[in-house]
Amino acid sequence: KAKAAGRNTLMFFDPTMAEEMTERHELEVDLRKACEDGSLELYYQPIIDLRTGEVVSREALMRWRHPVRGMVPAGQFIPVAEQSGLIATIGDWAIRQACKDAASWEKHVGVSVNISPLQFREPRRIVETVKNALIASNLNSQRLTLEVTESLLIEDNKTTLGVIDELRMLGVTFALDDFGTGYSSLGYLSTYPFAQVKIDQSFTKTVQSSEASKAIIEAVCQLARRLSMNVVVEGVETEQQRIAVQLLGAQRAQGYFFGKPAPVASLAEAKRHVA
Ligand code: C2E
Ligand code: MG
Ligand code: MG
Ligand code: MG
């Protein structure tokens, strides 16, 4: 026991670890402020129909305009938000803001919002937030997609399924994000009523070099078609990757090749240029 404690004490004074803890704490303190002072923003990245080349939807990706660190991508602060409990507040805001933004877009363009598994731990809250966001924005509920990851599905099926069904009853659809990573199970695709499956970008990165990646993308596209779901291939960065995933049967794609996540104001600007 003394030995174990000794080891922990040593670990605690490990300078890199102490630095990480300070860093995390700092981020958390700043993030708490950011929730109140409006320095969180939603960027939007287009999702493209590969047959027509048209934008069918846009994924909301959160950014934090940090006074010192500059624009912080979601991947860097969402985990901090989840560990500190701030994700509930931030998540509510993202749903409301995304609905409001999308309501002013072309009527056929949808919006996708990422939802943390932790938001499902307060079932009433997420349902009410979505309902109120739809009412306040006057957005047609069919245009809203909620993206969840497999980590949600291994948690607690009954509550999760209940919340998903209640939201689907409103007309909202669900997408299974980052498919093929983590605890992927083909069973999730038939157990849960997803309208969309998003194939993780790790497969796209290797689509030209790996037979396994090709086979997986092709198989998921076929399966999705049989189950009447649409497929989005994530992380398409080059023309070659676009061609490859299209040949493997993908209907939709998303990635830097088509457009990077961009501030909502730049969408209106792009429209003006066309008009
Ligand atoms: P995700 O939902 O899988 O989002 C895709 C991520 O890949 C985004 O990173 C996006 O900027 C990046 N990406 C898109 N196209 C490409 C590409 O062609 N190449 C490469 N290398 N990357 C690409 P981001 O914005 O840092 O977000 C990371 C993750 O954070 C998201 O993964 C999502 O899980 C989470 N997230 C983002 N916004 C929110 C939010 O509002 N709420 C919650 N709960 N999570 C969010
Ligand atoms: Mg996503
Ligand atoms: Mg993803
Ligand atoms: Mg991801």
Image: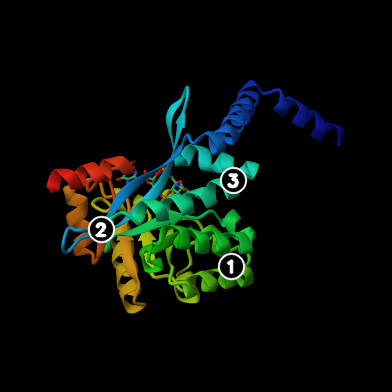
According to the picture, the residue beneath numbered tag 1 turns out to be 160
**Is residue 146 found left or right of 230 in the rendered image?**
right
- Residue at figure coordinates x 80%, y 28% from the top left: 6
Left or right of 106 in this view: 24: right
Q: Find residue 158 and report its horizontal and vertical position in percent.
A: 63, 72
**Is residue 256 something that shows in the picture?**
no
What element does badge 3 sit on? helix
Disc 2 secondary structure class:
loop
User: Is the shortest distance between ligand 1 and the CB of mark 3 under 8 Å?
Assistant: yes
Q: Does label 1 or label 3 sit earlier along the sequence?
A: 3
Pointers 2 and 1 in contact (CB under 8 A)? no
Q: Residues within 10 Å of mark 1 (few under 14, many from 20)?
A: some
- What amino acid is at disc 2? Glu
**x and y percentages locating residue 133 in the rendered image:** 48, 58
CA gap, disc 2 and disc 3: 33 Å
Number of the label disc, if any, that sits on residue 82? 3
Q: Is residue 21 left or right of residue 166?
A: right
Q: How is the image coloured?
A: rainbow
Question: Can you identify the residue that label 2 sits on?
Answer: 106
Q: What residue lies at 60% left-to-right and 35% top-to-bottom? A: 32
Q: Which mark is residue 72?
A: none
Where's residue 209, x and y in %?
A: 25, 50
Q: Is residue 35 above or below residue 107?
A: above
Q: Earlier in the sequence, mark 2 or mark 1?
A: 2
- The first of marks 2 and 3 along the sequence is 3
Foreground mark, 2 or 3, reads 2
Label 3 sits on what residue type? Glu
Three-letter code, disc 1:
Thr
